[in-house]
Structures are given as C-alpha cells and as structure tokens.
Image (cartoon, rainbow, N blue to C red):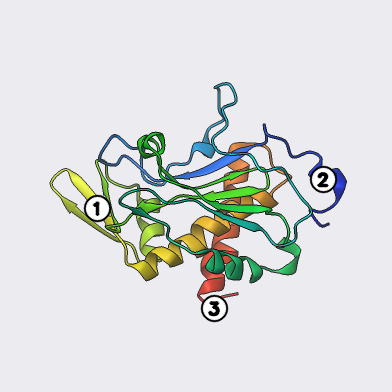
C-alpha cells in the first residue's frame, strides 16, 4: 500500500513517534556514541525537536539545507540524498516528504545526533569539519563495529577516544546508514514500541543500506 493513501497520512501528527540516532559521550558531556533516544519511551511532555513539516502527496522528497554552523559540515549534498533515495525499491518510495540538512546549534551540541525522523520528515545533522569526533567514554562493541563497517577509525589516547572519518567514509556512513535508518522509521507505521521500531530500522538500514551498497542485495 502506498503511503499516499489519505487514510494512512491522516494519522501522522506533530505528536508522532520520533526516532533519533545519537552520537555520543563526547568532549562537552555528550551522550554515549550510538545510544538511541528511541530505545526508551519518552516520559517528558512533548517537545518539538525540529521544525515540523506537514505531510504532502510528494513522491520525491523536498530537500531543505541550512548552514551547518561554524566548524561543522554537512556530510552529504541534496543531489546525493535524492540519488540515494531513488535507489530504494519502489515499494519504499514516497514515505519521506522532507529531508532537512539541519544546523548545529549550541543546544544540539550538548545532545548531538546524526539523524532524526519525525513524521514524514528526516533531519540530518552536521559533523565536525575536522572529521574527528572525540569521546569521553569508550564505544560499546556494536557501535564500534558499526562505525568500522563504514570506514570509521577508532583510536584511544589516555581517557579519550576518537573516531576519525574521511570525506568518502563519512558520506558512505550517512547515505547508507543514517539516512536509510531514518527512512526505515518513516516506513514503519506498524510498530509502536520503541524497541520494535528500532529493530525494524536497524534491519532496514542493514538490508537496504549496508548490504545494498556492497552489492549483496
């Protein structure tokens, strides 16, 4: 069934389930790498994490670009996003109306995420222009493996851990992991429990992100 079915779209509201891919306890007291806000049900009053975009009948998503912020860069371009989404199987087209390349704000630096899904919109966040992320806690094994799958290089110096990217590996990570993971959340209109939604998005990112990009589909 297409997402363009009015009865399906009418259920998407501003209080819809939000899912985020968090980055991590980085220098400046950031949360643990790869921990996901969507793993735990929110017990706080609804708080808009981003600008809300109403659902439309758009088949191809609109791309919105904001300046990344001083000392930050966007990992992907609008044309790369459009091309990557167009490569998804037809049955998964049309679930995302907007992809927004959001800025890095002072508040976001305290609780950074790689990506966020809210309603029919996906938000992608910038990364340090040095291409080096510095953490104050070690990554969990699964997060270490995930970054290394896409070419990230971990290293440790005393009590700090760094994750270093190249432009190509960072682009790969965003296009074939972060973006596809968040699209998976937009597609998943069946599950309501956070753990189930995360399980589906993880499967979708592996199957249609990592495996597809490695020619294993």
Q: Is residue 74 above or below residue 216?
A: above
**In the rendered image, which residue does mark 1 sit on?**
162
* Horizontal and vertical percent position of residue 5: 85, 51
Q: Between 113 and 103, which is closer to the camera in this rendering?
A: 103
Ranked by sequence position, the earlier of labels 1 and 2 is 2
The answer to which image quadrant residue 54 occupies is top right
* Horizontal and vertical percent position of residue 98: 64, 52
The disc label shown at residue 8, or none: 2
Q: Is residue 4 above or below residue 81?
A: above
Marks 1 and 3 sit apart, C-alpha to C-alpha, by 30 Å
Ranked by sequence position, the earlier of labels 3 and 2 is 2
Marks 3 and 2 sit apart, C-alpha to C-alpha, by 33 Å
What element does badge 2 sit on? Answer: helix
Front label number (3 vs 2): 2
**In the rendered image, which residue does mark 3 sit on?**
215
Residue density around tag 1, few if under 14, some if 14–19, many if 20 or more, within 10 Å: many
Marks 1 and 2 sit apart, C-alpha to C-alpha, by 43 Å
The disc label shown at residue 75, or none: none
What element does badge 1 sit on? Answer: strand
Quarter containing the N terminus:
bottom right
Q: Are marks 1 and 3 in contact (CB under 8 Å)?
A: no
Q: Between 101 and 155, which is closer to the camera in this rendering?
A: 101
100 relative to 106 in the view: left or right: right
Q: Residue at x 55, y 22 (%)?
A: 43
* Horizontal and vertical percent position of residue 185: 63, 49
């Amino acid at each position: 069934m297409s997402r363009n079915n009015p009865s399906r779209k009418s259920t998407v509201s501003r209080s819809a389930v939000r899912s985020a891919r968090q980055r991590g306890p980085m220098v400046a007291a950031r949360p643990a790498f790869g921990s996901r806000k969507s793993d735990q049900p929110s017990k706080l009053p609804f708080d808009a994490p981003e600008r809300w975009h109403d659902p439309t009948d758009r088949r191809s998503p609109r791309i919105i670009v904001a300046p990344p912020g001083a000392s930050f860069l966007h990992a992907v371009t609008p044309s790369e996003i459009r091309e990557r989404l167009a490569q998804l199987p037809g049955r998964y087209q049309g679930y995302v109306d907007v992809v927004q390349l959001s800025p890095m704000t002072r508040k976001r630096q305290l609780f950074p995420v790689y990506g966020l899904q809210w309603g029919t919109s996906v938000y992608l966040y910038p990364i340090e222009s040095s291409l080096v992320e510095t953490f104050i806690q070690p990554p969990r094994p699964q997060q270490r493996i995930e970054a290394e799958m896409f070419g990230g290089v971990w290293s440790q110096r005393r009590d700090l851990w760094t994750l270093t990217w190249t432009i190509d590996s960072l682009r790969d990570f965003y296009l074939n992991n972060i973006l596809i993971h968040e699209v998976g959340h937009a597609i998943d209109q069946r599950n309501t429990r956070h753990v189930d939604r995360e399980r589906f998005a993880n499967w979708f990112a592996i199957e249609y992100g990592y495996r597809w990009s490695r020619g294993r589909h």
